[in-house]
Image: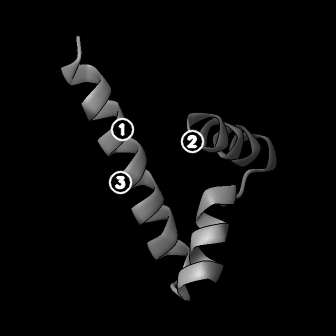
Amino acid sequence: MAADQSAAGVMTVANGRPMLTFGAKGLSSLLGISEAQAEFYYGLAGMGGELGAARQL
């Protein structure tokens, strides 16, 4: 997940326009929601994983 988001960030910087993550594209088509909503939910899922990992420290 982090690699997907990092790659989208690098492409955004390189191209000067926002790029979607592959995960959000998949969520958007699978659930029939907008790409913006899919990015939000994909980001929340990643944040939840990071918080869980931080609790283990």
Q: Which quadrant would residue 25 be assigned to in this image?
A: bottom right
Q: Secondary structure at mark 1?
A: helix
Q: Which residue is mark 3?
A: 44
Instruction: Tell me what residue is drawn at x 35 percent, y 54 percent.
Output: 44
Label placed on residue 20 = none
Q: Is residue 12 above or below residue 31?
A: above
Tell me the quadrant of the picture where the N terminus can be found.
top right
Q: Secondary structure at mark 2?
A: loop
* Residue 6 locus on image (x, y percent): 63, 36
32 left or right, relative to 55: right
Among numbered discs 3 and 2, the one appearing first in the sequence = 2
Count of residue discs: 3
22 left or right, relative to 35: right
Q: Which residue is mark 1?
A: 49
Tell me the quadrant of the picture where the C terminus can be found.
top left
9 left or right, relative to 43: right
Instruction: Tell me what residue is drawn at x 56 percent, y 89 percent.
Output: 32
Q: Mark 1 and mark 2: span between their CA atoms?
A: 10 Å
Q: Mark 3 and mark 1: span between their CA atoms?
A: 9 Å
Q: How is the image coloured?
A: one colour
Q: Mark 3 and mark 2: span between their CA atoms?
A: 11 Å
**Which amino acid type is shown beneath numbered disc 3?**
Leu
Q: Which quadrant would residue 29 be assigned to in this image?
A: bottom right
Contact, CB < 8 Å: mark 1 with mark 2?
Answer: yes
Q: Which residue is mark 2?
A: 1
